[in-house]
């Protein structure tokens, strides 16, 4: 008689959202031969728990361990999957056994013998290698990849127009385009010897035009350079890398593109047998990369980077990593065809820019006003996560000293490359906060989507022109940026400064406005016209566009207040008479040696801004963590601040790279932002300082209960207190996901950076006098003990 199975199967019992590919790497799940992983060993087997070692790591499974044991006992050498399931199904339900077997395959306990594996390449894909010489021949003759076609390299003296570089490169682009288009390749390896950069750039342009993925590899005279892998308009192209190299040179040497294109940095290998090992290794890596490009399961390894392999091949490689750059003459920052040079007062697609705010009544207000109930928001989020085709995890934090008091979640995703998505996704690790598990889960999930959508990687309408040519329909940079007391990693504001502009929507003036792309995207890509340090301030995702705009707007208000209080060395009033739920948390914190301090950081805008501190006075290593919350409703601001303070508290974790050695001072403290030494300034002004008190009951609820009306209330308050203000929203929503995401830019409010280096309209210096906390404003030098451009 078949025994019933517990519902948990072999999956860990935790708040986890996992999305697997349909089959593990290189495995056909329908009909396969299995064997037990030789690195698998059971350490302890007891009811409902299995402790085992796999790939040198100790893991714990909870659930149907008796079924796992039965499956392992039924394994005798190589076993057909169907036969294995049939044998175990004599004792347990077949459907459940099949599910457990699939999970054991995914986890690596059961594997497919190497000689039984099938290639996971996309059906009908063809691979090619262009070049002559040892590296190209070795790539095309890899026994593991027997169907790579060798395409002879083009002689360097085939064409010389004598009419200049532009004519010559155009000829070569046409030449390579015709040659490659006739081959119909899915992916191409290029292994040049004595090809000039003019010809390599022509290969790059031809591949861009044909949307042909390719990977570069060559001998530079001392090492084998492998990479970059270029997926047209999804990754930076070869000329992005070359542009970075040129920009890094001293301008006084006056080396331009035309000079650079004439040189060659790829050569034949010397006749030295010592190079054979490195050649074979590099060739195998290139062939595997071609397979990765055409696979739906494996991540290409050399996107946005180049590695250099020495003669004595070693595992330690030199990485040259780079991002896309909009001055690249090839792909134009992965945005070719969407960039305009001539100024224009209107976007081509205004409906994608305009943000018409509809009346939305809040239907969920635990941790901020939302226009969708929590259950529907969870369904919306889970549908979107399913599109990513990768392992997405949203897990509750366990093991930290505060995790039983206030829940928080981690959300993370691995790097994503899929031929089906029009963009790549970087690796992400984020957090979610809330006063209950439902809030914290949604917070973590929407934070993840917010950061994914804020990446620069999808074509966008962009203008490239000086500030002076678009002043009439661009954001007022002087109001937004203010005085730059010193310029660290930023450009000066002049009419001649070249800027990459994207379109946003002014909530104040109800019109389309140009905004520097550097103020919009959370990216390491290089844009022209960077005037402030990048941050996540004003980024928000929501269940509706109105949700996202409200949350982003509140975050800009929150950061404005925080930096005004902090930079002015002022102690905000302490909030007393806290609501019962927060008092209960404070009592529980006290029992474990912690104190809860709540400060009122509200300033002239009148929007409630609250900062919460959790302090452990007797532990200098994990001393304090803080969180901020802003809302027209003081309860929401308070709850967000307290839950964010807990979220900032360190959680116990298992290091991915164990270091068994005596620890020095740097190891112990490092970059621990909770240590007392990182909080000297805050310790003086906010943690230990005495201050006036304000009763929580006196903080009025200013919220209308309508999301769009609350947005307008905040806009009105900014307008009353900030001259020449504007609030611009850039729509970052990706249609593939369907979750509204925006960047809100509040021109006139203080923007965050560490350290502060620009000050819009001197607002930061004026606030203490306006609030009655000082009789006279302090200067930049008095506040920061500095005199940059003073």
Image (tube, grey):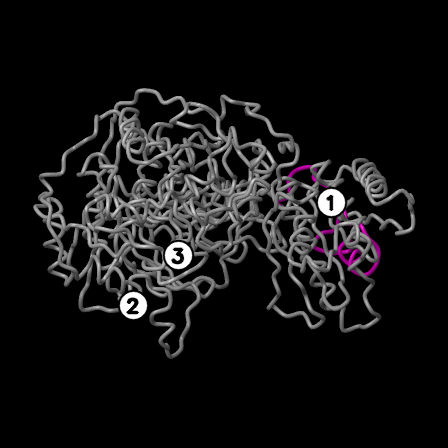
Toward the bottom, the furthest residue is 662
Is 132 a magenta residue?
yes
Tally the numbered discs: 3
Image quadrant occupied by the C terminus = bottom left
Task: Give the CA distance from mark 2 to mark 1.
Answer: 51 Å
Task: Give the CA distance from mark 3 to mark 1.
Answer: 40 Å
Describe the element under mark 2 as helix, strand or loop.
helix
Describe the element under mark 1 as helix, strand or loop.
helix
The label shown at residue 755 is: 3
**Left-right relation of 782 to 189:** left
> Which range of residues does the magenta coloring cover?
120-147
Q: Nearer the viewer, residue 266 or 555?
A: 555
Task: Give the CA distance from mark 3 to mark 2.
Answer: 17 Å
Marked residue nearer the N-terminal end (3 or 1): 1
* Residue 745: quarter of image: top left
**Left-right relation of 530 to 644:** right
* Residue 226: quarter of image: bottom right
Sort mark 1 into few (<14), some (14-19) or many (20+) by Cα contacts within 10 Å: many
Q: Position of residue 408 (x, y in %)?
A: 28, 48
Mark in the foreground, 3 or 1 = 3
Q: Position of residue 232 (x, y in %)?
A: 66, 41
Please name the predominant secondary structure of the magenta segment in the image: loop
Q: Position of residue 51 (x, y in %)?
A: 34, 61
Please give the residue where the numbered disc 2 appears in the rendered image. Answer: 677
Q: Nearer the viewer, residue 375 or 201?
A: 201
- Seen at 37% across and 77% down, the residue is 664
Q: Nearer the viewer, residue 742 or 26?
A: 742
Please give the residue where the numbered disc 1 appears in the rendered image. Answer: 204
- Seen at 30% across and 26% down, the residue is 712
Q: Looking at the image, can residue 7 be seen?
A: yes
């Amino acid at each position: 008689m078949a025994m019933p199975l517990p519902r948990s199967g072999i999956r860990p019992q935790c708040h986890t959202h996992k999305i697997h590919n349909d089959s593990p790497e290189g495995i056909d799940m329908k009909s396969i031969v299995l064997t037990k992983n030789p690195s698998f060993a059971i350490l302890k087997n007891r009811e409902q728990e299995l402790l085992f070692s796999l790939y040198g790591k100790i893991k714990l499974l909870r659930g149907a361990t008796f079924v796992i044991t039965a499956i392992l006992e039924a394994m005798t050498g190589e076993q057909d999957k169907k036969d294995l399931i049939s044998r175990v199904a004599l004792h347990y339900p077949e459907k459940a056994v099949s599910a457990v077997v699939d999970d054991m395959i995914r986890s690596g306990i059961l594997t497919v013998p190497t000689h039984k594996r099938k290639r996971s390449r996309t059906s009908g894909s063809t691979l090619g290698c262009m070049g002559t010489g040892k590296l190209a021949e070795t790539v095309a003759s890899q026994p593991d990849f027997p169907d790579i076609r060798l395409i002879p390299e083009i002689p360097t003296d085939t064409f010389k127009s004598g009419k200049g570089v532009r004519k010559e490169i155009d000829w070569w682009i046409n030449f390579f385009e015709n040659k490659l288009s006739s081959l119909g390749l899915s992916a191409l390896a290029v292994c040049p010897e004595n090809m000039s950069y003019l010809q390599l750039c022509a290969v790059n342009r031809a591949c861009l035009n044909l949307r042909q993925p390719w990977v570069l590899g060559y001998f530079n005279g001392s090492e084998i350079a492998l990479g970059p892998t270029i997926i047209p308009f999804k990754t930076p192209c070869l000329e992005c890398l070359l542009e970075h190299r040129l920009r890094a040179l001293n301008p006084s040497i006056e080396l331009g593109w035309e000079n650079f294109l004439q040189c060659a940095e790829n050569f034949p290998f010397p006749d030295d047998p010592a190079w054979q090992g490195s050649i074979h290794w590099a060739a195998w890596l290139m062939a595997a990369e071609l397979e990765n490009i055409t696979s739906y399961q494996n991540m290409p390894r050399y996107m946005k980077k180049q590695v250099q392999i020495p003669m004595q091949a070693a595992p330690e490689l030199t990485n040259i990593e780079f991002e896309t750059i909009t001055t690249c003459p090839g792909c134009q920052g992965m945005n070719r065809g969407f960039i305009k040079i001539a100024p224009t007062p209107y976007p081509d697609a205004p409906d994608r820019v305009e943000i018409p705010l509809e009346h939305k009544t809040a239907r969920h207000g635990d941790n901020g006003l939302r226009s969708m109930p929590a259950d529907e928001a969870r369904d919306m989020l889970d549908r979107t996560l399913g599109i990513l085709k990768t392992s997405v995890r949203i897990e509750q934090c366990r093991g930290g000293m505060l995790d039983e008091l206030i829940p928080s979640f981690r959300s993370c995703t691995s790097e994503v490359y899929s031929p089906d998505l029009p963009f790549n996704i970087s690796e992400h690790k984020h957090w979610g906060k809330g006063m209950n598990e439902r809030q914290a889960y949604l917070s973590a999930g929407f934070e993840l989507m917010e950061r994914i959508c804020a990446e620069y990687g999808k074509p966008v309408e962009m203008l490239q022109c000086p500030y002076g040519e678009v002043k009439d329909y661009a954001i007022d940079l002087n109001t937004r940026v203010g005085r730059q007391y010193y310029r660290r990693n930023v450009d000066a504001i002049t009419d001649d400064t070249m800027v990459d502009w994207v379109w946003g929507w002014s909530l104040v003036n109800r019109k389309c406005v140009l905004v520097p792309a550097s103020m919009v995207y959370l990216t390491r890509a290089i844009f022209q016209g960077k005037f402030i340090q990048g941050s996540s301030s004003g980024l928000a995702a929501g269940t509706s566009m109105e949700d996202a705009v409200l949350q982003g707007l509140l975050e800009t208000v929150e950061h404005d207040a925080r930096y005004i209080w902090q930079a002015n060395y002022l102690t905000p009033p302490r909030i007393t008479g806290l609501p019962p739920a927060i008092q209960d948390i404070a009592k529980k914190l006290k029992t474990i040696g912690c104190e809860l301090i709540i400060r009122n950081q509200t300033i002239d805008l009148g929007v409630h801004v609250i900062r919460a501190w959790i302090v452990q006075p007797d532990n200098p290593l994990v001393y304090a963590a803080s969180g901020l919350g802003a809302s027209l409703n003081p309860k929401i601001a308070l709850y967000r601040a307290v839950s964010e303070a807990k979220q900032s508290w360190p959680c116990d974790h298992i290091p991915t790279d164990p270091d068994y050695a005596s620890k020095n001072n740097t190891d112990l403290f490092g970059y621990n932002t909770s240590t007392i030494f990182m909080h000297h300034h805050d310790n003086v002004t906010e943690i230990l300082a005495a201050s006036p008190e304000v009763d929580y009951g006196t903080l009025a609820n200013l919220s209308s209960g309508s999301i769009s009306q609350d947005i307008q209330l905040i806009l009105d308050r900014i307008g009353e207190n900030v001259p020449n203000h504007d609030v611009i929203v850039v729509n970052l929503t990706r249609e593939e996901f369907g979750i509204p995401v925006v960047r809100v830019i509040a021109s006139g409010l203080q923007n965050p950076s560490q350290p502060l280096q620009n000050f819009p309209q001197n607002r930061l210096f004026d606030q203490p006098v306006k609030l009655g906390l000082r009789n006279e404003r302090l200067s930049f030098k008095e506040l920061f003990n500095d005199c940059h451009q003073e």
